[in-house]
Image: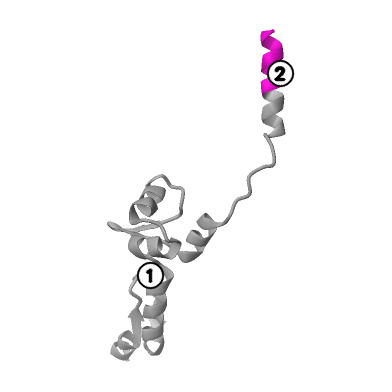
Amino acid sequence: MDRQRRNAVTKTQMGAVSIPASAGAVAKVAARERYLSPDEAAEYLNVSVGFIRRMASERRVRHYRLGRFIRFDPADLDAFAEVKEPLSGPDPALVTQVWRRSRRLS
């Protein structure tokens, strides 16, 4: 029975989660689709591979290291690429600090 149990459970390609053998093929595909290589991530965002690697090294985009491999979650790439609206003007707190400093100097 122990042998049957071992044969009924496989590991996903990522090696972290145990799943029933009947769902093994589906889980392996899902594991591969969930995390993208730098080439796939660059294609996903329509940028160069060097840009993706630089953003990862500068920690501007969330990435996962698996040994020597770098992987990206598409949800994290979506969050990175999300449009960030600029402020309509200078930050009021910064303006106040600059104004106070200039008053002290004069």
Name the amino acid type tagged 2: Arg
55 lies above or below 74: above
Q: Which mark is residue 100?
A: 2
The magenta segment: 98-106
Q: Based on the displayed image, in which of its 4 quarters is residue 24 positioned?
A: bottom left
Kindly state the secondary structure of the residue where label 1 is placed. Answer: loop
Q: Position of residue 40 (x, y in %)?
A: 37, 65
Residue 99 left/right relative to 72: right
The answer to whether marks 2 and 1 mark residues whose Cβ atoms lie closer than 8 Å is: no
Q: Main secondary structure of the magenta part?
A: helix
91 lies above or below 25: above
The residue identified by callout 1 is 16
Q: Based on the displayed image, in which of its 4 quarters is residue 87 positioned?
A: top right
Q: Position of residue 29 (x, y in %)?
A: 38, 79
Q: Does 28 lie within the magenta span?
A: no
Name the amino acid type tagged 1: Ala
Mark 2 to mark 1: distance in Å?
55 Å
Q: Position of residue 68 (x, y in %)?
A: 27, 56
Q: Which mark is residue 1?
A: none
